Image (cartoon, helix red, strand yellow):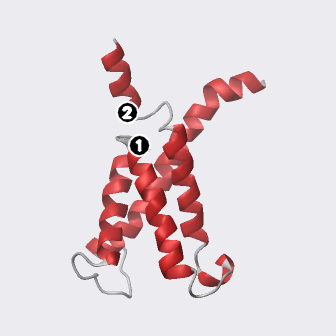
C-alpha cells in the first residue's frame, strides 16, 4: 500500500470511523447523566444546571455526529464543552491530568477540534447532502 492510497482512500474513511466511535462513546456520558443508563452512582442532574446542559450536549451532539450531520459546528461546540469541563471540573483537583481524571476531557477536546477542522470524512450525511446539492 503506497502513501497516496493511504491519504486518498483510507484517511477519509478512518476520519469517519474516528468520528463515529468518539461520538458513540461520548454519547454514553449523556445517556448516563440524562437517562440513567448505564446506571450511575450520581443522581440525575437538576434541569438547566451545568451537568444537565453538558448531558444534553453530549447526548444530542453525539447523536448528530454518529451519522455525520452538522459535523463541523457540533464538533466545535463539543470541543469547547470538553475544554470547559476540564478547567471547571478537573484542573482544580490537580495540575496533572493523570491525577485529576481529566485525560478523557483533554482527548475529547482535541479529537473534536480536529473533526471540526477536518470535517466528517467520506461517510457522513453532511457529505451526502453537499454532493446532492452540487449535482
Q: Can residue 24 be seen at all in this image of the molecule? A: no
Q: Is residue 9 left or right of residue 38?
A: right
Identify the residue at horizontal 70%, vertical 29% (top origin): 6
Identify the residue at horizontal 53%, vertical 51% (top origin): 113
| Residue 51: % across, % down | 34, 77
Disc 2 designates what residue? 126
Residue 2 lies in what quarter of the image?
top right
Secondary structure type for disc 2: helix
Labelled pair 1, 2 in contact (Cβ < 8 Å): yes
Disc 1 designates what residue? 71
| Disc number placed over residue 42 in the picture, else none | none
| Residue 58: % across, % down | 37, 63
**Of the pair 74 and 123, the residue shown nearer to us:** 74
Placement of 135 over or under 101, stated as above or below: above
Placement of 62 over or under 53, stated as above or below: above
Identify the residue at horizontal 64%, vertical 86% (top origin): 94
Q: Quadrant of the N terminus?
A: top right
Secondary structure type for disc 1: helix
Placement of 41 over or under 74, stated as above or below: below
Residue 105 lies in what quarter of the image?
bottom right
**Of the pair 30 and 130, the residue shown nearer to us:** 130
Placement of 1 over or under 76, stated as above or below: above
| Residue 53: % across, % down | 30, 70
Identify the residue at horizontal 27%, vertical 72% (top origin): 35
Q: Can residue 96 be seen at all in this image of the molecule? A: yes
Q: Residues within 10 Å of mark 2 (few under 14, many from 20)?
A: some
Q: Residues within 10 Å of mark 1 (few under 14, many from 20)?
A: many
**Of the pair 90 and 8, the residue shown nearer to us:** 90
- Which circle's residue, 1 or 2, is located before the other in the chain? 1
Q: Quadrant of the C terminus?
A: top left
| Residue 106: % across, % down | 59, 66
Query: Outermost residue toward the right?
Result: 2
Amino acid at each position: 500500500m503506497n502513501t497516496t492510497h493511504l491519504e486518498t482512500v483510507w484517511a477519509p474513511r478512518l476520519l469517519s470511523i474516528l468520528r463515529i466511535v468518539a461520538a458513540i462513546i461520548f454519547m454514553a456520558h449523556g445517556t448516563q447523566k440524562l437517562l440513567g443508563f448505564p446506571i450511575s452512582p450520581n443522581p440525575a442532574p437538576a434541569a438547566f444546571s451545568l451537568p444537565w446542559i453538558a448531558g444534553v450536549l453530549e447526548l444530542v451532539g453525539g447523536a448528530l455526529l454518529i451519522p455525520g450531520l452538522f459535523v463541523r459546528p457540533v464538533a466545535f461546540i463539543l470541543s469547547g464543552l470538553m475544554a470547559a469541563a476540564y478547567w471547571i471540573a478537573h484542573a482544580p483537583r490537580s495540575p496533572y491530568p493523570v491525577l485529576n481524571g481529566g485525560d478523557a476531557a483533554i482527548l475529547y477536546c482535541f479529537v473534536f477540534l480536529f473533526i471540526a477542522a477536518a470535517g466528517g470524512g467520506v461517510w457522513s450525511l453532511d457529505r451526502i447532502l453537499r454532493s446532492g446539492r452540487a449535482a
